[in-house]
Amino acid sequence: QVQLVESGGGLVQAGGSLRLSCAASGRTFSSSPISWFRQAPGKEREFVAAVHWSGGVTNYADSVKGRSTISRDNAKNTVYLQMNSLKPEVTAVYYCAARNPFSNIYPDPQVYPYWGQGTQVTVSS
Protein backbone atom coordinates (compact mmCIF):
# COMPACT_ATOMS: atom_id res chain seq x y z
CA GLN A 1 0.00 0.00 0.00
CA VAL A 2 1.13 3.57 -0.70
CA GLN A 3 0.35 6.78 1.18
CA LEU A 4 0.74 10.02 -0.78
CA VAL A 5 1.15 13.64 0.33
CA GLU A 6 1.24 16.51 -2.16
CA SER A 7 2.92 19.86 -1.60
CA GLY A 8 4.16 22.84 -3.55
CA GLY A 9 0.90 24.39 -4.61
CA GLY A 10 0.14 28.04 -4.15
CA LEU A 11 -0.77 31.31 -5.79
CA VAL A 12 1.30 32.38 -8.80
CA GLN A 13 0.91 34.94 -11.54
CA ALA A 14 0.30 33.94 -15.12
CA GLY A 15 3.56 33.01 -16.80
CA GLY A 16 5.09 31.82 -13.56
CA SER A 17 6.23 28.36 -12.50
CA LEU A 18 5.53 25.89 -9.73
CA ARG A 19 7.01 22.55 -8.78
CA LEU A 20 4.63 20.16 -7.12
CA SER A 21 5.92 17.28 -5.02
CA CYS A 22 4.28 13.99 -4.16
CA ALA A 23 5.93 12.31 -1.20
CA ALA A 24 5.12 8.67 -0.71
CA SER A 25 5.43 6.14 2.03
CA GLY A 26 5.07 2.43 1.61
CA ARG A 27 7.24 -0.39 0.37
CA THR A 28 5.76 -0.53 -3.11
CA PHE A 29 6.31 3.09 -4.20
CA SER A 30 9.37 2.37 -6.33
CA SER A 31 7.41 -0.15 -8.40
CA SER A 32 4.21 1.91 -8.72
CA PRO A 33 3.25 4.11 -11.65
CA ILE A 34 2.39 7.61 -10.46
CA SER A 35 0.15 10.17 -12.12
CA TRP A 36 -0.93 13.72 -11.52
CA PHE A 37 -4.55 14.72 -11.99
CA ARG A 38 -6.31 18.02 -11.44
CA GLN A 39 -9.84 19.05 -10.69
CA ALA A 40 -11.25 22.52 -11.08
CA PRO A 41 -14.53 23.58 -9.43
CA GLY A 42 -17.51 22.11 -11.23
CA LYS A 43 -15.35 20.01 -13.53
CA GLU A 44 -14.36 16.37 -13.68
CA ARG A 45 -10.95 15.21 -12.53
CA GLU A 46 -8.59 15.19 -15.49
CA PHE A 47 -5.27 13.59 -16.27
CA VAL A 48 -2.18 15.80 -16.32
CA ALA A 49 0.92 13.59 -16.45
CA ALA A 50 2.20 10.14 -15.55
CA VAL A 51 5.53 8.45 -14.94
CA HIS A 52 6.28 4.75 -15.18
CA TRP A 53 7.58 3.03 -12.07
CA SER A 54 11.01 2.84 -13.70
CA GLY A 55 10.98 6.55 -14.46
CA GLY A 56 11.88 5.84 -18.05
CA VAL A 57 8.48 6.42 -19.60
CA THR A 58 6.27 9.45 -19.19
CA ASN A 59 2.96 10.61 -20.62
CA TYR A 60 1.33 14.04 -20.72
CA ALA A 61 -2.05 15.49 -21.46
CA ASP A 62 -1.97 17.52 -24.66
CA SER A 63 -2.86 20.63 -22.68
CA VAL A 64 0.40 20.54 -20.70
CA LYS A 65 2.88 19.11 -23.20
CA GLY A 66 5.93 21.28 -23.56
CA ARG A 67 5.19 23.24 -20.40
CA SER A 68 5.27 20.53 -17.74
CA THR A 69 7.75 17.84 -16.73
CA ILE A 70 7.06 14.87 -14.50
CA SER A 71 9.93 13.05 -12.83
CA ARG A 72 10.54 10.73 -9.93
CA ASP A 73 13.29 10.06 -7.43
CA ASN A 74 12.73 6.59 -6.05
CA ALA A 75 15.54 7.03 -3.54
CA LYS A 76 13.53 9.90 -2.03
CA ASN A 77 10.13 8.29 -2.61
CA THR A 78 9.03 11.44 -4.38
CA VAL A 79 7.46 12.38 -7.69
CA TYR A 80 7.66 15.92 -9.04
CA LEU A 81 5.61 17.93 -11.47
CA GLN A 82 7.38 21.00 -12.80
CA MET A 83 4.91 23.41 -14.40
CA ASN A 84 6.05 26.42 -16.40
CA SER A 85 4.34 29.25 -18.27
CA LEU A 86 1.28 28.81 -16.12
CA LYS A 87 -2.09 30.07 -17.31
CA PRO A 88 -5.18 30.94 -15.24
CA GLU A 89 -7.11 28.06 -16.78
CA VAL A 90 -4.90 25.51 -15.03
CA THR A 91 -6.18 26.66 -11.63
CA ALA A 92 -7.32 23.53 -9.83
CA VAL A 93 -6.61 21.14 -7.00
CA TYR A 94 -3.79 18.86 -8.09
CA TYR A 95 -3.69 15.27 -6.90
CA CYS A 96 -1.07 12.58 -7.24
CA ALA A 97 -2.20 8.99 -7.50
CA ALA A 98 -0.55 5.59 -7.55
CA ARG A 99 -1.47 2.38 -9.33
CA ASN A 100 -0.71 -1.07 -8.05
CA PRO A 101 2.89 -2.24 -8.49
CA PHE A 102 4.19 -3.07 -11.97
CA SER A 103 1.11 -1.68 -13.68
CA ASN A 104 1.33 0.50 -16.77
CA ILE A 105 0.78 4.22 -16.74
CA TYR A 106 -2.78 5.08 -17.74
CA PRO A 107 -4.72 8.36 -17.89
CA ASP A 108 -7.99 7.12 -16.32
CA PRO A 109 -8.40 8.07 -12.64
CA GLN A 110 -10.62 5.01 -12.09
CA VAL A 111 -7.62 2.66 -12.19
CA TYR A 112 -5.72 4.43 -9.42
CA PRO A 113 -6.50 3.06 -5.95
CA TYR A 114 -4.23 5.38 -3.96
CA TRP A 115 -4.63 9.16 -3.79
CA GLY A 116 -3.19 12.08 -1.92
CA GLN A 117 -5.27 14.83 -0.35
CA GLY A 118 -4.48 17.36 -3.09
CA THR A 119 -2.72 20.72 -3.28
CA GLN A 120 -4.32 23.91 -4.57
CA VAL A 121 -2.77 25.68 -7.55
CA THR A 122 -4.13 29.13 -8.33
CA VAL A 123 -2.87 31.15 -11.29
CA SER A 124 -3.87 34.80 -11.37
CA SER A 125 -4.14 36.81 -14.56
Image: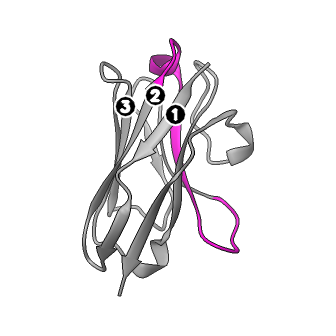
Question: Of marks 2 and 3, which one's residue comes earlier in the chain?
Answer: 2
Helix, strand, or loop for circle 3?
strand
What residue is rendered at 37% in x and 31% in y?
Answer: 78
What residue is rendered at 25% in x and 72% in y?
Answer: 16
Is the residue marked by circle 1 packed among few (<14), some (14-19), or many (20+) residues within 10 Å? many
Q: Quadrant of the N terminus?
A: top right
Check residue 4 in the rendering and tell me which mark sits there, or answer none: 1
- Image check: 15 left or right of 62? left
For the residues marked 1 and 2, what is the alpha-carbon distance in whole angstroms? 5 Å
For the residues marked 1 and 3, what is the alpha-carbon distance in whole angstroms? 9 Å
Question: Of marks 1 and 2, which one's residue comes earlier in the chain?
Answer: 1
Q: Position of residue 38 (x, y in %)?
A: 56, 59
- The residue lying furthest to the top in this view is 27
Helix, strand, or loop for circle 2?
strand
- The residue lying furthest to the bottom in this view is 125
Residue under pointer 3: 78
Residue under pointer 2: 24
What residue is rendered at 32% in x and 63% in y?
Answer: 67
For the residues marked 2 and 3, what is the alpha-carbon distance in whole angstroms? 6 Å
Say whether marks 2 and 3 touch (CB < 8 Å).
yes
Against 85, residue 95 (above or below) is: above
What residue is rendered at 57% in x and 23% in y?
Answer: 2
Q: Which residues are magenta?
A: 25-45
Disc 1 residue type (three-letter): Leu
Q: Position of residue 124 (x, y in %)?
A: 36, 82
Q: Position of residue 93 (x, y in %)?
A: 53, 61
